[in-house]
Amino acid sequence: MEYSALKSSLPQNIQILTLEPWKNSTLLLRLEHILEMGDESSLPDTVQLSFKNLFKNMEIMSARETTLAANQFLEDSKRLEWKSTKPHDLSKNRKVNQTTFFKRTYITSHGNCNISPFCTKKIALGYI
């Protein structure tokens, strides 16, 4: 018999990558969204996933997106802008990965739960 903490199956191209304790009574949960390059399958490029009913014994009450490392809220982060003295042509000899990953990370708060490792005040959720 197999146990799953999930209420229902995740979409076919979504997987749980990480679930671990995090800072300030939080947990880090990363989900990965995998798309095969050149794959003309019926799997959608965009997937919607509700955190509200994700787990059996835990109710997620809110979510706030962060950077992948979960060290900054996304709205507070600023991408670096690199200045170069000469332009580079990146189109030559460019290698393409066979798989594309979409990455998102969230800080969430939740209500009551019955599994002790998950009984914390907040959860950090990563969506990859």
Image (cartoon, rainbow, N blue to C red):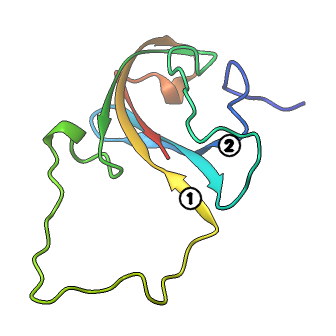
| Residue at the image point whose x is 57% and y is 14% from the top | 53
- Nearest the eye: 12 or 114: 12
Q: Which residue is mark 1?
A: 100
| Residue 119 higher or lower than 34, as above or below | above
Which mark identifies residue 13? 2
- Nearest the eye: 67 or 112: 67
Q: How many marks?
A: 2
Q: Amino acid at mark 1?
A: Thr
Crowding near the residue tagged with mark 2, few <14, some 14–19, many ≥20 C-alpha atoms within 10 Å? some
Say what secondary structure mark 2 lies in.
Answer: loop
Residue 92 figure quarter: bottom left
- Nearest the eye: 94 or 22: 94
| Residue at the image point whose x is 72% and y is 56% from the top | 39
Crowding near the residue tagged with mark 1, few <14, some 14–19, many ≥20 C-alpha atoms within 10 Å? few
Image location of residue 88, percent across then percent down: 26, 86
Image location of residue 4, percent across then percent down: 73, 28
Q: Is 7 on the left-hand or right-hand side of 102? A: right
